[in-house]
Image (spheres, rainbow, N blue to C red):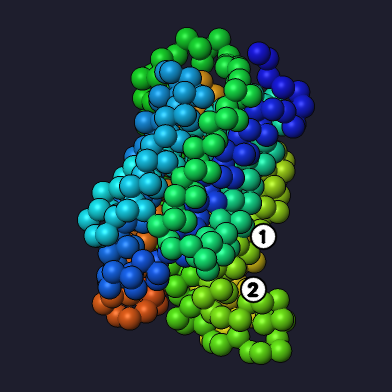
C-alpha cells in the first residue's frame, strides 16, 4: 500500500481511536488518588508509586513495542498491548495492598506502551506523505488530548455510582474493544533505498553517536516530569490547595461545586486546550525549525508553572493555568517524533522514538514519585513543583544546540 496523499485516511482515523481510548484511561488515574488512599488508609506515596511505576513501565515498554511492531507487525503489537493493558486493569481492580497495585502497574504501563504513541505514531508517520506527516502526527497527538478531556471527568462521573474497582473493569472492557478497529490499520513501509539497506543496529549506532539525539532524549525528560506530576497529582493538589468555589459563580452554576470536581475538570481543560496547541505545533513544525519550537514550548511551560505557584491558588487561577499549560501540553510530541523521523528516517522510527520516550517516562516516574514522597514529608507539593520549573528551564536551553540537518547527521554520526 502506498503512502496516502490525503491527510485523513483509515490509518489515521484508527490511530486516533486507539490513542483516544488508551489515553482517556491513562489520564484518569489521578482521580483515583484520594478514593483509593482513603479506602485502604494508605499514604499518598503508596498509590503515587503505583502510578510512577506505571509510567516507568510505559517508558521501558515503548522501545520494546516499537521493535516488536517492526518485527511482527504494527497490528499484532497493538493487540498484544491491548491484552496486557486489559489484564493489568482487571487485576488492579481486585488489589488491596500497595504492593499489588505496584506490581500490576507494570502490566498497565506495558499495555499503554503497546497502544500508545510509540507504535501508533510510527504507523501513521509511515502512512503519511512528507507534506502531511507533521500534521498527521499532530492530529494523533491531539486525539490523546481528547482522551484526556473525557478520561478524568468520565472516571469522576462513574465514581458517583460505581466503586472504583468496577470503574477499572469498565475501562478494561473499553481497552479490549480496541482490537475490533485494527483490521482497518494497514500501514505501508515507505523508506528510501538507503534506509532499507541499513539494519536496526546501524541506525541505532548512528543515532547514539549523534549528540543531537542525546539532547532530544535529555530534553524530553522534563516533559515527562511535568506531565507525570500534573496528571497524577493535580486533581488532589486542586482538591486540597484551591480556594473554595463560591456559590453564584460561573463554575458553581455549571455544576462544579467542589474543588474535587474542579480537579477532575482541570485535567479535562488541559486536554481540551492541548487539542488546539498540538495542531498548531504540527502546522508550525512544517514551517519552522522544530528545535526552536520545542525551546519555546518549554519556556512557556516554565513561565506558566512559576507564575501559578507564586500567586494564590484560586478557582480562576486553576482554570487559567490549565488552559495555558494545556496549550503547551503535548505540543512536544509531534515536534519530537517529527524531529526523530526527519533526522534518522522512518524505517525504525518506532524504536528510535521509543528510546527517546523512555527518557520522558523516567522523568514521569520521578515527577510522580517525588510528588507523593514530598507530600508525605512536607504536607504539600511546593518543592516538587519548583523542581519542575527548574527542569523545564533547563530543557528549553538544551534544545538550542540540536543540529536539525539530516545531511549533517549522516556525515558526523
- Is 312 placed above or below 88 here? below
Point out residue 229 in the picture as x, y percentages from the top left corner: 42, 63
Residue at the spot of label 1? 273
The residue depicted at 63 percent of the width and 33 percent of the height is 14
The residue depicted at 48 percent of the width and 78 percent of the height is 239
Q: Quadrant of residue 135?
A: top right
- Is 362 placed above or below 197 here? below
Q: Hey, which residue is sitting farthest bottom in the picture?
A: 247
362 relative to 5 in the view: left or right:
left
Q: In which quadrant of the rendered image does the N terminus lie?
A: top right
The residue depicted at 40 percent of the width and 69 percent of the height is 35
- Is 289 placed above or below 128 here? below
Q: Quadrant of residue 120?
A: top right
Q: How many residues crowd mark 1 within 10 Å: few (<14), some (14–19), many (20+)? A: many
Residue at the spot of label 2? 320
Point out residue 48 in the picture as x, y percentages from the top left corner: 33, 62
Q: In which quadrant of the rendered image does the C terminus lie?
A: top left
Check contact, mark 1 vs mark 2: CB within 8 A. Answer: no
Identify the mark nearer the N-term, 1 or 2. Answer: 1
The residue depicted at 32 percent of the width and 63 percent of the height is 47
Q: Quadrant of residue 209?
A: top left
Closer to the camera in the image, 242 or 354: 242
Point out residue 385 in the picture as x, y percentages from the top left corner: 42, 71
Q: Secondary structure at mark 2?
A: helix
367 relative to 411 in the view: left or right:
left
Find residue 234 and name its label.
Answer: none
Q: Is residue 142 visible?
A: yes
Q: Is residue 215 visible?
A: no
Amino acid at each position: 500500500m502506498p503512502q496516502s496523499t490525503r491527510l485523513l485516511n483509515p490509518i489515521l482515523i484508527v490511530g486516533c481511536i486507539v490513542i483516544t481510548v488508551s489515553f482517556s484511561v491513562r489520564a484518569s488515574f489521578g482521580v483515583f488518588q484520594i478514593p483509593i488512599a482513603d479506602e485502604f488508609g494508605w499514604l499518598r506515596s503508596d498509590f503515587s508509586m503505583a502510578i510512577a511505576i506505571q509510567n516507568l513501565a510505559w517508558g521501558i515498554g515503548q522501545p520494546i513495542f516499537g521493535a516488536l511492531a517492526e518485527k511482527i507487525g504494527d497490528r499484532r503489537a497493538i493487540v498484544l498491548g491491548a491484552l496486557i493493558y486489559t489484564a493489568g486493569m482487571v487485576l488492579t481492580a481486585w488489589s488491596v495492598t500497595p504492593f499489588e497495585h505496584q506490581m500490576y502497574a507494570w502490566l498497565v504501563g506495558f499495555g499503554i506502551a503497546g497502544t500508545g504513541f510509540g507504535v501508533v505514531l510510527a504507523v501513521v508517520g509511515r502512512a503519511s506523505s512528507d507534506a502531511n506527516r507533521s500534521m498527521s502526527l499532530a492530529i494523533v497527538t491531539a486525539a490523546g488530548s481528547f482522551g484526556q478531556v473525557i478520561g478524568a471527568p468520565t472516571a469522576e462521573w462513574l465514581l458517583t455510582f460505581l466503586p472504583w474497582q468496577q470503574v477499572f473493569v469498565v475501562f478494561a472492557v473499553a481497552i479490549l474493544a480496541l482490537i475490533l478497529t485494527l483490521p482497518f490499520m494497514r500501514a505501508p513501509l515507505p523508506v528510501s533505498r538507503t534506509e532499507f539497506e541499513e539494519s536496526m543496529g546501524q541506525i541505532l549506532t548512528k543515532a547514539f553517536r549523534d549528540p543531537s539525539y542525546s539532547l532530544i532524549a535529555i530534553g524530553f525528560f522534563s516533559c515527562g516530569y511535568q506531565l507525570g506530576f500534573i496528571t497524577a497529582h493535580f486533581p488532589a493538589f486542586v482538591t486540597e490547595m484551591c480556594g473554595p468555589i463560591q456559590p453564584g459563580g460561573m463554575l458553581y452554576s455549571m455544576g462544579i461545586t467542589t474543588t474535587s470536581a474542579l480537579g477532575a475538570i482541570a485535567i479535562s481543560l488541559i486536554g481540551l486546550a492541548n487539542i488546539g496547541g498540538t495542531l498548531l505545533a504540527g502546522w508550525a513544525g512544517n514551517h519552522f525549525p522544530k528545535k526552536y519550537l520545542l525551546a519555546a514550548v518549554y519556556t512557556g511551560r516554565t513561565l506558566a508553572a512559576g507564575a501559578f505557584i507564586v500567586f494564590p491558588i484560586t478557582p480562576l487561577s486553576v482554570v487559567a493555568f490549565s488552559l495555558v499549560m494545556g496549550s503547551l501540553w503535548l505540543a512536544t510530541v509531534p515536534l519530537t517524533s517529527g524531529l526523530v523521523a526527519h533526522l534518522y528516517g522512518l524505517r525504525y522510527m518506532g524504536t528510535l522514538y521509543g528510546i527517546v520516550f523512555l527518557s520522558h517516562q523516567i522523568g514521569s516516574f520521578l515527577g510522580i514519585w517525588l510528588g507523593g514522597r514530598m507530600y508525605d514529608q512536607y504536607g504539600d507539593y511546593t518543592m516538587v513543583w519548583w523542581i519542575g520549573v527548574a527542569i523545564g528551564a533547563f530543557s528549553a536551553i538544551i534544545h538550542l544546540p540540536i543540529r536539525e540537518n539530516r545531511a549533517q547527521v549522516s556525515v558526523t554520526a
